[in-house]
Amino acid sequence: MKPTIKIDFVSDVACPWCAVGLGNLNHAIAHLGDKASFEVHFRPFELNPNMPESGQDAIEHLKQKYGLSESQIKANQANIRLKAREAGFEFHSEGRKHVYNTFDAHRLLYWAAEEYGLNEQAALKKELLTTYFCLSVHFNEHQSLLDAVDRAALNRGRATDVLNSDSFSQAVRDEERTYIDLGITAVPSIIIDSQYLLQGAQPPDVFINAFEKVLTGHE
């Protein structure tokens, strides 16, 4: 029987590098799929927990947060689009226009894992990242989130019930606090088999090397 490697992928759907990191992680998992099974848990982290539901213009937000000029921001966005394409995400050609609150997305991801399973959570994670970065839609509208639920082949009616209530709110808050208490301050942060912490959008080879170290310990 193949050993199982557990992965805690701490991230936010508003983080473009999280999409890049996820794509690279999936490439690495595919590369070693004949040697190990992988159990990927998506854990919540909010880059902007106090962001209002209406969100904020992306250029304005990035200027305020990082002190960058508009030209620097656009250059960074162009670089991220290239990296995202290599990782399997086709980001919108004009870059994201708005930054949104993502708490409802995290509640849906928790719901998907709780009521379906990790494969379904992974499918929804991919579709929520696609919604945020690849489609020209308003992420703060339930319609956009529910369309992602549809594409992930999950139950739209049940997702609507979750969004229209406070379901899983405390569970998400508790998980967020767990990883903050562990010292996570930036995402993506990837914890491999509770032994190795990788941060940032690492290339596939870095993940493969970490997996091979874990597998050596299983021998």
Image: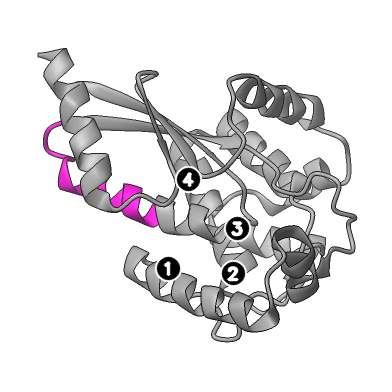
Residue 122 numbered tag? 4
* Mark in the foreground, 1 or 3: 1
The answer to whether 188 appears left or right of 145 in the picture is left
Residue 2 in view here: no
Amino acid type, label 4: Ala
Please identify the quadrant where the N terminus is shown: top left
Give the residue displayed 26% in from the left and 23% down from the top. 4
The answer to whether 8 appears left or right of 180 in the picture is left
Disc 4 is placed on an element classified as: helix
The local crowd at label 4, few if under 14, some if 14 to 19, many if 20 or more residues have their Cα within 10 Å, is some
Residue 22 in view here: yes
The local crowd at label 3, few if under 14, some if 14 to 19, many if 20 or more residues have their Cα within 10 Å, is many
Q: Circle 3 sits on which residue?
A: 128
Foreground pick, 110 / 202: 202
Q: Circle 2 sits on which residue?
A: 133
Measure how far apart labels 3 and 2 are at the Cα level: 9 Å
Residue 192 numbered tag? none
Give the residue displayed 61% in from the left and 25% down from the top. 179
User: Residue 57, located in which quarter of the rendered image?
Assistant: bottom right
Mark sitting earlier along the chain (1/3): 1
Circles 2 and 1, Cβ within 8 Å, touching? The answer is: yes
Position above or below: 196 against 126: above
Please identify the quadrant where the C terminus is shown: top left
Q: Circle 1 sits on which residue?
A: 84
Amino acid type, label 2: Phe
Measure how far apart labels 2 and 1 are at the Cα level: 10 Å
- Residues shaded magenta: 22-35
